[in-house]
Image (cartoon, rainbow, N blue to C red):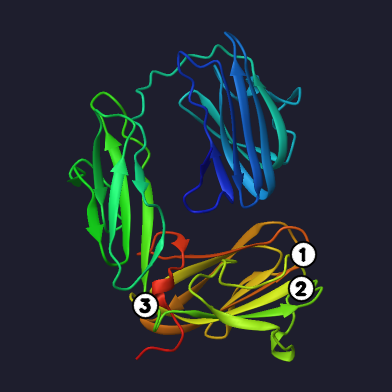
């Protein structure tokens, strides 16, 4: 179960079984912002069975093992091809590739499954401490651990993917400024590990900050907060529902206001993942409209931004049930990630 790189947060899912000699069945699941993704397959000498659940508002590309072509595949006992939710794309390396919409599926393939000859994967390293915010002037020691003592850990400090030419981790090191640490383990005869990442954000509390305003009400959509009086106000350093924000369990609204510093001009993409509704504005322009009563949903929008400071505003309401709000951004030069507090300022900086 993987996220499609161009649709972060599992809006579009890649599901590709890896059938090795010692595997006869796999049960896997992942809880995304859209809901639970499930994959359960088993194989015998002449049959492959695969049960899949795709949450609402998402889609998936799946790879089903076959002997010859897609005619050998059935979904819920019927040959594939008649359902609009299941679209055949191509044959690729002994697998039929389909795009499917949200829903529950039960696929069978009457074919002799040849186990793939695969190398094992090196244990994934663990970076500690993980993803914490610090104040300007702080220092922190970073350690990287791996369960395989024979593996060699390579790492980078600029957010790029490590390879075997990257720095070798031998002992903990110190950082004192905003840094993205990425690590990957390598071992002869094995595939490299899955890369791991940790983000450290150093905040200047005298300059960085986001003003928040909390409103009470049983809202069905985001109201015009300009016409309402906030019950409480304050400052935080993250665009999410963190502990700095004093809010009730349900039936409330929030407005966040700050200035985002853009170092490189270009096309930027902003995302809100929320339950219930949210909207994101840049310089007064609506970029992301994720309004309405709904479960966890992510939506996005793009805007061309010049280098410098830009007003950013996020509106949110909670209309009952659970509460979620996360805000991300990305660009050609910025990997998809939460907007760091170190580039959000209380006032416009010259």
| Precedes in sequence: disc 3 or disc 1 | 3
Distance (Cα) linking label 3 and label 1: 36 Å
Q: Is residue 320 above or below residue 109?
A: below
- 336 or 168, nearer to the observer: 168
**Residue farthest to the top, as pictured:** 45
Report the residue at 64% width, 35% height from top. 38
Report the residue at 49% width, 67% height from top. 269
- Quadrant where the N terminus sits is top right
Report the residue at 22% width, 53% height from top. 173
Q: Position of residue 247 (x, y in %)?
A: 68, 72
- Check disc 3 and report its element: helix, strand or loop: loop
Q: Is residue 161 visible?
A: no
Question: Residue 347's quadrant in the figure?
Answer: bottom left
Residues under numbered marks 2 and 1 in contact, where contact means CB atoms less than 8 Å apart = yes
Q: Is residue 119 above or below residue 85?
A: above
| Precedes in sequence: disc 2 or disc 3 | 3
Q: Is residue 160 above or below residue 187?
A: below
Q: Is residue 261 visible?
A: yes
Q: Which residue is mark 3?
A: 204
Q: Position of residue 261 (x, y in %)?
A: 39, 79
**Which mark is drawn over residue 217?**
none
Q: Which residue is mark 2?
A: 221
Distance (Cα) linking label 2 and label 3: 35 Å
**Which mark is drawn over residue 293?**
1
155 to the left or right of 290: left
183 to the left or right of 320: left
């Amino acid at each position: 179960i993987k996220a499609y790189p161009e649709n972060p947060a599992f809006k579009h899912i890649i599901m590709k079984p890896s059938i090795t000699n010692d595997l006869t069945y796999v049960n896997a699941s992942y809880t995304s912002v859209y809901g639970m993704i499930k994959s359960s397959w088993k194989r015998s000498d002449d049959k492959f069975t695969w049960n899949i659940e795709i949450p609402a508002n998402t889609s998936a590309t799946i790879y089903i093992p076959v002997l010859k072509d897609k005619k050998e595949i059935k979904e819920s006992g019927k040959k594939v091809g008649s359902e609009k939710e299941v679209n055949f794309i191509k044959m690729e390396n002994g697998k039929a590739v389909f795009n499917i919409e949200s829903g529950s599926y039960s696929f069978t393939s009457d074919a002799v499954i040849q186990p793939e000859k695969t190398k094992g994967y090196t244990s994934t390293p663990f970076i500690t401490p993980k993803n914490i915010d610090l104040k300007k002037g702080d220092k922190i020691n970073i350690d990287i651990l791996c369960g395989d003592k024979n593996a060699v850990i390579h790492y980078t400090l600029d957010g790029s993917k490590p390879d075997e030419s990257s720095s070798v981790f031998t002992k903990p090191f110190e950082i004192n400024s905003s840094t993205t640490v990425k690590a990957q383990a390598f071992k002869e005869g094995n595939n490299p590990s899955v890369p791991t990442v940790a983000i450290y954000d150093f905040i200047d509390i005298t300059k960085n900050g986001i003003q928040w305003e909390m409103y009470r009400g049983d809202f069905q959509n985001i109201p015009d907060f300009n016409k309402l009086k906030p019950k409480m106000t304050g400052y935080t350093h993250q665009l999410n529902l963190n502990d700095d924000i004093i809010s009730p369990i349900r039936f409330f609204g929030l407005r966040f206001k700050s200035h985002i510093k853009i170092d490189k001009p270009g096309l930027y993409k902003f995302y809100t993942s929320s339950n219930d509704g949210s909207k994101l504005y840049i310089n007064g322009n609506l970029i992301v409209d994720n309004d309405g009563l709904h479960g966890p949903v992510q939506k996005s929008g793009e805007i061309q931004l010049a280098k410098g400071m830009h007003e950013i505003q996020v509106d949110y309401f909670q209309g009952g049930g659970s509460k979620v709000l996360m805000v991300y951004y990305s660009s050609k030069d910025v990997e998809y990630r939460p907007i760091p507090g170190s580039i959000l300022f209380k006032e416009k900086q010259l």
